[in-house]
Amino acid sequence: MSLCIRVVSKAKFVDCSGYVDEEEGECCDHKRIESFPLGQEGLKTGCYVPGKGGRSFYFEIGYADYAQWFDELYRMLYGVDTDGVCRKFRRHRGKPFIEFVDVPSASDGQTIGPKMSAKLHGDFVAFARKARKHFTQTEELAWMWDAYRDFRKAFKIASDGGFVCYW
């Protein structure tokens, strides 16, 4: 099973009659968001489409891969895995990528809004050189560089009045 990451910029709320395919979480081809662990940021629960000049982006990552990727990202930055970051959360508060601790790996409609997306995009840009070097040093980690670039793209798009939604 995979975690689906859906992204929209210039998000426009649309009135919707309901789910078409509950299995996929698709709602009449709209992007439906359910909740905001990191703040609403001006968005509300419901269906959205990209507004005028907006874009959308989508990618998947396996649940186990997602957890492994974050463990490796935190090891690269802080020398500890995700559990280590969580155990000493106060020490890491406000540091790069720490917001991901609050996003469950298996969530239906958990959403990160445009302000947090802009902050995370900045983190991805600032650490891109270090991440590329780290993630491409072995074949076992090479796929993680692709995931890093997908997340960087997602948060860039979402920072333009949109969101990143986990399904």
Image (cartoon, helix red, strand yellow):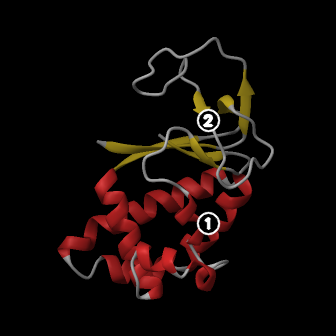
The residue that label 2 is drawn on is: 33
Q: Residue 121, how many percent across, how many down?
A: 61, 65
Q: Looking at the image, which residue is at 54% across and 56% down?
A: 103
The residue that label 1 is drawn on is: 120
Height in image: 79 above or below 113?
below
Q: Where on the picture, by quarter, is residue 110?
A: top right
Amino acid on which disc 1 is placed: Leu
The number of numbered discs placed on residues in the rendered structure image is 2
Q: CA distance from mark 1 to mark 2?
A: 19 Å
Q: Are marks 1 and 2 in contact (CB under 8 Å)?
A: no
Q: Looking at the image, which residue is at 72% across and 18% down?
A: 15
Q: Secondary structure at mark 1?
A: helix
User: Residue 131 vs residue 19: left or right?
Assistant: left
Amino acid on which disc 2 is placed: Ile
Assign the N terminus to one quadrant of the image.
top left
- Mark nearest the camera among 1 and 2 is 2
Q: Where on the picture, by quarter, is residue 137?
A: bottom left
